[in-house]
Image (spheres, grey):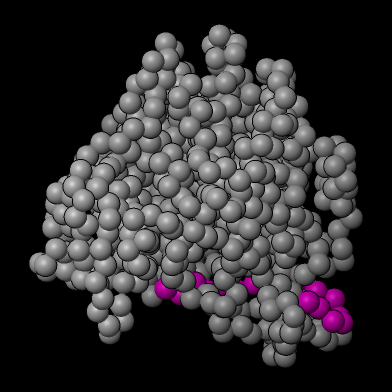
Amino acid sequence: MGRASLTRNGVTILAGVFAALGFANVQVGAKHTQSAKEPIQIVADLSEAPRRIFRAEIDLPVTAGPLTLTTPQWIPGTHMPVGPVAKIAGVAFTANGQTLLWRRDEVDLYQFHLTIPSGVTNLHAHLDCIVSDRVSEKVAMLEWESLLLYPAHIAVREIPVQPSVIVPAGWGIGTALTPMAPGSNPVPAAGSTTRFAETDVEQLEDSPILTGEYFHEFLLAPEISPKHVIGVAADTPEEAALKAPVLAEIANLVREADKEYGSHHYHEYHFLLTVSDVAGIGGLEHGQSSDDGVGDKDFTESERRPAIADLLAHEFTHSWNGKYRRPASLYQPDFATPQHGELLWVYEGMTQYLGNVLAARAGLKSPQEYREVLAFWAAWMDFTAGRNWRSTEDTAVAASLLRDIDRWGNWTRGQDYYFEGELLWLDIDTLIRKTTNNHKSLDDFERLFLGKGGNTGPAIVPYTFDELAATLNQVMPYDWASFLHDRIDNVHEHADFDGIRRGGYDVAYQEELSASEKSMVQAFPKWLGSLEEWFSAGVLVNADGSILDVRWNGPSYEAGLAPGDRIIGVNGRVYNGDLLRAAIRDAKGKTEPIHLMVQRESYLRTADIDYHGGERYPVLKRNGETSAYLDDIVKPLASSPNAAEKK
Ligand SMILES: [Zn+2]
C-alpha cells in the first residue's frame, strides 16, 4: 500500500532538511553514476543455513575498465565497523563465461578490484558467508551486509538492487521487503526463488529476512494503519506459536507507540522474532522491521520475562528514534565512512527510556518490574567507577571501541550512553511534568521531534544538538542546552537520580535480589555472573567462583582481587556461592574481614575483604514527593480493544 507513491526506491529523504545541513550530496535525485543505472540482481541462498553457510549469486551491470566493488563496513544500528568481510569466502567473478582475477585493496580490506574486459556488460559474482550469529538448526536471520557486493564510492541509496531469496524446503519467510507476487504465501514451494521488488542498497541493508521451519505470522492491532505483523521462528513448534496473552501485549505496544509518536515512517512494520537459545538474545533496529531474538521460554515463563520485556518496544521505537530521526553526524551516505557517535545518548539513551516506558504501558512488564529494572540500572551506573574519569559523551564518541569490554570493564566503562541516557530522559520528563504542573511531558516532545513531517514511508531526517534543545524549548522554555551539556559532557561522581527522586522514589537497597534481577542473571550469566556480591563486596562472581569483574576502589579491589581470579575458599571452607553470601551476611556490623583463598593462574593467595555492610540489592522506595510521576509515566495512553488476530 502506497509503496510506489514515494520515490522509485521506496525511500525518501527529506531533501530540504539535508540541504539545510549541508548534505546536498545525498538528496534524492542526485545523478546516478554510470554503473548504477540497471539494478544489481542478488539471490541470497539460505538453503544451507543450518550448516551456517549463506550463499549469494550476484549480477552487476558493468562497463569495460577498472571496477572497485565493496562490502559494507560501518553497519547502521551497530554504530561499528563490523561488516562481516572476514567471514566471506568462495569469492569468484565471471563474465561471458570467463573467470576474472580480483585483488583486495591493501588499505580498505572491504574492497575488491577488478578489470572488466571490453564488451562485457554483466559481471557475475559468487560469494559465501560463514555465519555464526542469529542462526540455528531451525532458524536463520539474513542481515544483508553478509552478502552484499556493490560499486564502491557511490552513495548506497543511489544503487538500485533487486533482491531474491531461496530458503530451506518448507521454511517460512518474514520480511518488510515487498514480494514481487502480491499476497504471496510466506512458505514458498520447495527450492523456489522468492523475488522482491527493486529497492536500493541502503534500504536492502535495512530490510532483513527471517526464515524458519517453525514459522508463524500474526497480524497486530488490525484497527491501526499501516499494517503491523510479527513473524516468529523458533527451534520448536510450541515456541513459534506465541500465545494469545503475549500477542495481546505486543498489539498493545503497537497501540501505545501509535499514541506516543502520533505518526509512522514505514509502509508496513514487521517484528522479526527468533525464539531460540542458539540464535541468541538481542535486537537490531531497522526502519520497517526489527531483528529481535529471545531465548527459549522467555515469553512463556513469567520469571524469565523481565530481562527481555523491553526488547520489542526498544527496537520498534528505533523506527522513529534512530532510523527516521538520526543524528546528522551518525548518518553517512555509504557504509564505508565512519559514523560519529556523539549523539548516541539520544539515539540509544532516549530509546532505552522509551522502550521501557512503552513496554510497561503495553503490559509487557508490570509497573513494579519497570521500577526494579530502573533501580538496577541506576545503581549499576552509580557503581561504575569509570564515571570518575569518562563522561557519558565520551562513551558515545568512543562507542565503536566499547561493545565488548572484558577485564576491569567497571573502570573502562562500556556503552553507558544507553543507561545514562535513560536516566537523563527520565530527568527531563519529570522536570517538564513538575514545572508544568503535569500539563506537559516528554510525550509532547516526542510528537514534535519524532513525528516531525507527519506520516512518511521509510525516510531519514537528520538532526543536530541545537534542534534537540530548541524542540525541548518549544515544550517548556528552559536553558536545555546548558542542562544537557552539563549532564552529558561533564564527569559526574554519581549517576543522575534526579528523575527517580522527582518521580516520587529513591534508590534504596534491600537484602534480596529483585525478581527482575533474578531474570537478568538467568538471561545474561556471562555478563552478570550471580550478581550477588556486586553492590556489596564489589565483585562479580560466577557460580564456579571465577571472577568476572572487580569494582574499582571497592572492598574486593582493596583486598587485591582481579578479574580472572577464582575464589576457591571462604573462611576456611571450600567455596560455593551460598557460602560467600552467608559470609557477607555474617560479617555485617562486625570487624573481622571475610577471608578468601584465591587462585590466580597456577598460584594461590589469601585475600581479606574488609566489608561489613551486609547484602545489598537496589530497589526503588517511595519517597515524600506528593506526585509519583514514575507511576503516571507507565500508565497506558491507548485503549486495547481486542487481542491480536492470527493471519
Ligand atoms: Zn537500540
Between residue 553 and residue 226, name the one nearer to us. 553
Between residue 501 and residue 553, name the one nearer to us. 553
Residue 617: name its quadrant. Answer: top left
- Residue 614, above or below 355: below
Give the main secondary structure of the magenta stretch.
strand
Residue 635: name its quadrant. Answer: top left
- Residue 396, above or below 503: below
Kindly identify the residue that appears in the image at 74 percent across and 38 percent down.
Answer: 465
Q: Is residue 65 magenta?
A: yes
- Residue 615, above or below 456: below
Answer left or right for 212 relative to 416. Answer: left
Kindly identify the residue that appears in the image at 21 percent across and 71 percent down.
Answer: 597
Where is residue 500 drawn, in percent x and y?
45, 27
Where is residue 240 drawn, in percent x and y?
30, 49
Residue 453: name its quadrant. Answer: top right
Kindly identify the residue that appears in the image at 24 percent across and 48 percent down.
Answer: 612
Where is residue 449 drawn, in percent x and y?
68, 29
Q: Is residue 620 visible in this depiction of the protein?
A: yes
Kindly identify the residue that appears in the image at 69 percent across and 90 percent down.
Answer: 99
Between residue 200 and residue 302, name the one nearer to us. 302
Most distant residue in the left direction: 573
Where is residue 304 drawn, in percent x and y?
26, 45
- Residue 66, above or below 246: below
**Magenta stretch bounds:** 52-68
Between residue 23 and residue 195, name the one nearer to us. 23
